[in-house]
Amino acid sequence: MSSITTPMAYQTPLARPERALVEDTFYVTQGIEVRQQLLPIAKGVTFRAAYLAVGVRVDAGGRLSGRPQRPGTFVAPVQLCMDRSCQAHNLTLVVLANEPWEPRELTFPGKVGTPLDGEIGINGGPSGVVPTFTVTDVEKVPGGVSIGPDGHVGGVPVVAGISEVPVRICVAGNCAGVVVRLIIV
């Protein structure tokens, strides 16, 4: 009796749809250019291009781009593909109305050897959206001090002086650059 031997190929399945992406909800602002990236859990994942909301699409590389045209919450299936297999995964795009905002505090006095405890914060913007803060030139941050992604200014300064630190503040994709001034005596 002869046997037929078939080579077995192991195909790594995509993660369950509810765990396929690091993040599946994005907050953006009406009329502001979207520049986001989908991050799949598995390696080798591609996407099928599709529109997510009026003016916003995802390309085969997982890049979200475009300008959202109207506010609302949009749920759209996105095809995640690996080899020849694809799975639909729902992506949520929350488009917020473009509400103006401004930074609340940008100057922080301090003393060498004494802990700093301040908050940049914002006034205005859409309610319920947490702003993010990114230092764009870490070389300008004085020793012992840090500015966190939540806007917290903290640490224990080790040297006196005036530092002007460039920070990018984003509220649902509506971003602006500011200068945070640290005056350490």
Image: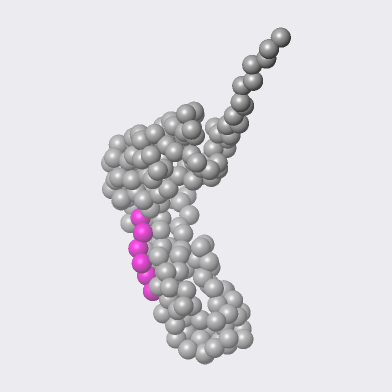
Q: Nearer the viewer, residue 104 or 164?
A: 164
Q: Is residue 26 left or right of residue 7?
A: left
Q: Nearer the viewer, residue 172 or 88?
A: 88
Residue furthest to the top: 1
172 up-or-down from 55: above or below? below
Q: Tell me what residue is drawn at x 30 percent, y 51 percent.
A: 32
User: Residue 8: x, y in percent?
Assistant: 62, 26
56 up-or-down from 141: above or below? above
User: Residue 163: x, y in percent?
Assistant: 44, 82
Residue 40 visible at all: yes
* Quadrant containing the N terminus in the rendered view: top right
Q: Tell me what residue is drawn at x 43 percent, y 73 percent.
A: 137
Rendered image quadrant of residue 123: bottom left
Q: Tell me what residue is drawn at x 49 percent, y 46 percent.
A: 39
Rendered image quadrant of residue 46: top left
19 up-or-down from 162: above or below? above
Q: Total label count? A: 0
Residue furthest to the right: 1
Residue 31 lies in the magenta stretch: no
Task: Give, as a single range, the part of the protein colored magenta.
Answer: 174-179
Please, which colouring scheme is shown?
one colour
Q: Tell me what residue is drawn at x 47 percent, y 84 percent.
A: 183
Q: Main secondary structure of the magenta part?
A: strand
